Amino acid sequence: MRLHKQISVILTNKCTANCDICCYSCSTKENEKLSFSEIENILNTVTQNNSISHLNISGGEPFLYLDDLYKIVEMAHKKKLTISCVTNGFWCNDHDKTYEIIHKLKQLGLDVLYTSYDMYHSKYVTADKLKLLFDVCKECHLDVQLNLMQLEQYSTFTSELFHQLGYSLYGVKIYYIPICNAGAAKDNIEPDAFHKKNVNELQCVFTNTMNVMSNGNVYPCCSNYVREIPFLCAGNIHEEDFETIYNRLKMHWPFRLVMEYGLQKLAAVIREVKPDAFREEYTDDCELCKEIWSNKENIDILYSFYKK
């Protein structure tokens, strides 16, 4: 079976913002954090067999722990990994300091920087900070990507943001991403406000990225709903060695089923026993996956299918 090709490490769930849509419910009040030695052990393990080629560093806000971030990027680069990192840009206060940080990360081996923005992030990070971030990334020849988080209803926010950012957007990769019905968003956003897709159109796209959360839990994918699916957790690095968990993931039967058959096949197997098991629409493929693996009867049906 094909192994994971990427690993996402949630360095911390502490953030400088308290966004109503955060899929991991990160906030200023949280304080989970992976240590540098834990991440070093993780990267040593996943690079031994050369199956992992990319590291993504996320949060929370990784730039709250800048010294650790420098060391992680340098170490990952020496292991010949490509590296991405997520930030909200709170630290972009003046050109010289922003340049110093971006230039150093670029020199250490960072390949791309991601930032998300919407009306919820804008309460904590101004568009001027984004503008500075984009300008400096281009000065340092560091790729940067803007993820615009979207709800179903039309909003003028994006067009107004583009007007504010102006020429700073040139060369920035822009992606529109539906806000998922998980974490803080599940508690703060009305259900009808989320984008919806027909259940028969949903296909998993995250099976090549394993995920280590800030509390040490390890999951076979980087779904935004993964914290809400305890059954999929392969172990916790605070309770056992990461190499043991990593080897277990290779034989993780739910992961094997999703990879080999896809969500549509698994949903069809369940429907043979439970014809009305699923709604007609879901926010995304990960929400459907959550419904599959959060129900014991579904799990029992799929385990019988797996044993065959």
Image: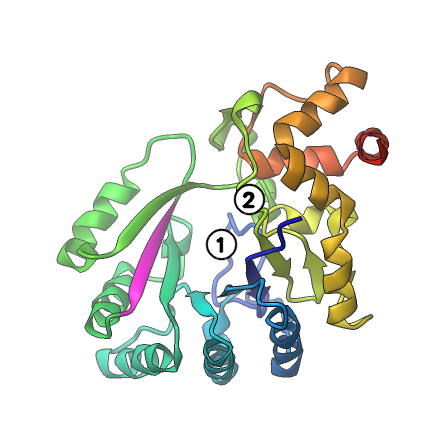
Above-or-below relation of 122 to 93: above
Query: Mark 2: which amino acid?
Result: Ala
N-terminal label among 1 and 2: 1
Total number of numbered discs in the rendering: 2
- For this view, does 1 lie left or right of residue 53? right
Residue farthest to the left? 167
Above-or-below relation of 114 to 259: below
Label 1 – label 2 distance at C-alpha: 9 Å
Residue neighbourhood size for the residue with mark 1, other residues' Cα within 10 Å, grouped as few (<14), some (14–19), many (≥20)? many
Residue neighbourhood size for the residue with mark 2, other residues' Cα within 10 Å, grouped as few (<14), some (14–19), many (≥20)? many
Residue, disc 2: 185
Residue, disc 1: 19
15 in the magenta segment: no
Residue 277 visible in image: no
Magenta: main secondary structure equals strand
- Name the residue rendered at 81%, 71% in the picture: 240
The location of residue 211, given as percent across then percent down, is: 62, 58
The magenta region covers 142-148
- Name the residue rendered at 48%, 70% in the picture: 81
- Name the residue rendered at 71%, 43% in the picture: 256
Q: Quadrant of residue 29?
A: bottom right
Residue 168 visible in image: yes
Colouring rule applied to residues: rainbow
Mark 1 secondary-structure assignment: loop
Q: Which mark is residue 51?
A: none
Query: Mark 1: which amino acid?
Result: Cys
- Name the residue rendered at 63%, 77% in the picture: 44
Mark 2 secondary-structure assignment: helix
Q: Quadrant of residue 138?
A: bottom left
The location of residue 41, given as percent across then percent down, is: 66, 78
